[in-house]
Image (cartoon, rainbow, N blue to C red):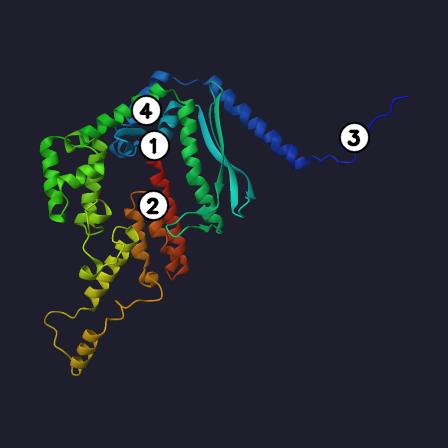
Amino acid sequence: MNELVESPFANRSAVPETAGARQDQSRELADLQVVYTMAERFPRDEVKAMDRILLAFTRPLLAEKSQYEYSRGGTEIRGASIKSLEAIAAAWGNIDAAWRERSRGVDARGIPYSEVEAVAVDLQTRTRKRISFIVPHWRDTRQGGYVLKDERDCYELCANQAQRRVRACLEAVIPSDVVEAAMQQADVTLKAKADTSPEAMAKMVEAFAPFGVTKEHIEKRIQRRLDSITPMQVVTLKRIYASLRDEMSEPTEWFEMGDAPSAEAEGAPAAEGSRTASVKSRMKAGTKKKDAPPAGAKAKPGAGAATASATAAPRAADAPTKTDAAVVTYAEVAQALNEATNPDDANAAADLIRHVKDAQQRTELGALYSSRMADLDEDAP
């Protein structure tokens, strides 16, 4: 008589299915049936949908944010941004796109992470695209980086990373010719708003001249000759000019100006090229202006000794402190974050958040950093 081998799973108890779990499953199934049934009953009119998409990209504000563009190895690389694909999906109809955090864990280095999934579905054609990826709860900085502990920071990091995958999913389910037509309409809208004629470019070079920015500096930034500039780059240069005109930034933050003057000669930080150093430099300059007496002010009795003492030794504002970031204020960090043009600049400004004294202000700056990173991610490939 044959003897049966004992099953290694015989003693394992089955996980009981609760009434709440069955109810959730029934609700999810019902929701899926409704959306698929409605998509089948009311299919999209592709002609009307295409008209809605083209009409949407005649709006200048949407056209300005419609594409990311950069040069690599002399080749121009461009594509639809997250906001433009969301607008296309809304006008195309019967498209569902979302992301969710599936689980959390800790990797071999001891860094917490989230497993995130992004998905886009064409409910009418049953086309689905899903991307799963890992998001470490870690923020890189110029000094190395640190683990994120605040739940809000972790969520916003996951959301920023997920939006790029959602964009890729939408590109997979929406016909490519629809996206290309929308981008062509955006180009037409920008050309109507942004003048790229030789006369307009000559005026732009003339406008930048008072700031020490030459035609060569501009061409080096846009990585092409000025006569081949794109409308989107014209819009970007106008924003840079407005920032310089309002004294919200310095030319070295936007253009490679060559060798900067020495720190001893100008009284500026050694790392003049970094945005963080520029923030501190402007802050120290503002402190000097506040401390300087008015031109017609009379000296108080006994001021001569104080003046001699100030001449012999540096003022407290200029003396080395325990940390250079001790003078950082909410306004300066917020300004640096708003002026950031790439993730490295935003991370450099974010390094100063922890030195702001007020806890509520640090929270607000963290939210601003996450928002800026989300905007900068749209310009990334």
Q: Which residue is disc 2 drawn over?
A: 344
Q: Earlier in the sequence, mark 1 or mark 3?
A: 3
Q: Earlier in the sequence, mark 1 or mark 4?
A: 4
Instruction: Give the amino acid type for the residue marked by disc 4 in the picture.
Output: Ile
In what element is the residue under mark 3?
Answer: loop
* Rendering quarter of residue 222: top left
Q: Earlier in the sequence, mark 2 or mark 1?
A: 1
Foreground tag (3 vs 4): 3
Q: Are marks 1 and 4 in contact (CB under 8 Å)?
A: no
Q: Which residue is disc 1 drawn over?
A: 81
Q: Which residue is disc 3 drawn over?
A: 7
Of residues 154 and 137, the one drawn nearer to the viewer in this rendering: 137
Q: Residue farthest to the right? A: 1
Give me the C-alpha separation between circle 3 and circle 2. Answer: 57 Å
In what element is the residue under mark 4?
Answer: helix
Q: Earlier in the sequence, mark 3 or mark 2?
A: 3
94 horizontally vs 290: left or right: right
Question: Is there any visible trace of residue 297 in the rendered image?
Answer: yes
Quadrant into which the N terminus falls: top right
In what element is the residue under mark 2?
Answer: helix
Query: At x 23% / y 74%, what residue is drawn?
Result: 313
Q: Which mark is residue 210?
A: none
Q: Which residue is disc 4 drawn over?
A: 53
